[in-house]
Amino acid sequence: MGLLDGVLGQIMGGGENAIVANLAAKVGLTPEQAESAIAALTQAHPQPGDTVQTASDTTGLPQEILQQVLGHLGGEGGLTAIASSLLGKSE
């Protein structure tokens, strides 16, 4: 879970593995699925079209689950912060 977990830990506070594991437990995914969902949402966010639909098409996860993940990340603004951190940019 490495890089993404570390970035989430910096953004949201908390231990590295705990962030994704806690999110996964809240929405009924494995930690690996949760990390995949976060990555897909983050990649889909700047693309044209619906972020959740695009991430669902990429991961095969239901849109309802991805919508929950998005909510726990702080919505579209949370995705912007994650993407900025992953790219080494500041808001």
Image (spheres, rainbow, N blue to C red):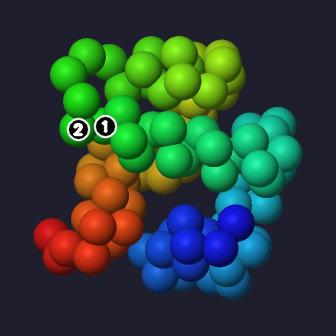
Is 9 on the left or on the right of 51, as rendered? right
Q: Position of residue 47 (x, y in %)?
A: 24, 30
Q: Quadrant of residue 76?
A: top left
Relative placement, left or right, of 67 versus 28 is left
Q: Which mark is residue 73?
A: none
Q: In which quadrant of the rendered view does residue 21 lie?
A: bottom right
Q: Among all residues in the image, which is located at the extreme left?
A: 91
**Badge 2 density bin: few <14, some 14–19, many ≥20, Cα 10 Å:** some
78 left or right of 7 in image: left
Location of residue 79 with respect to 33 vertically, above or below: below
Residue at screen point 56% across, 73% down? 3
Q: Quadrant of residue 2?
A: bottom right
**In the picture, which quadrant includes the N terminus?**
bottom right
Which x, y percent locates residue 89?
A: 20, 73
Above or below 90: residue 53: above
Q: Amino acid at mark 2?
A: Pro
State the residue at coordinates (67%, 79%). 16
Q: Are the residues flagged by discs 2 and 1 in contact, CB closer than 8 Å?
A: yes
Report the residue marked by disc 1.
Answer: 45
Label 1's element?
loop
Determine which residue is flagged by label 2.
46
CA distance separating discs 2 and 1: 4 Å
What's the residue type where badge 1 is placed? His
Residue drawn 27% across the image and 76% down it: 88
Q: Residue at x 25, y 16 (%)?
A: 49
Residue 90 x/y as whole percent: 18, 76
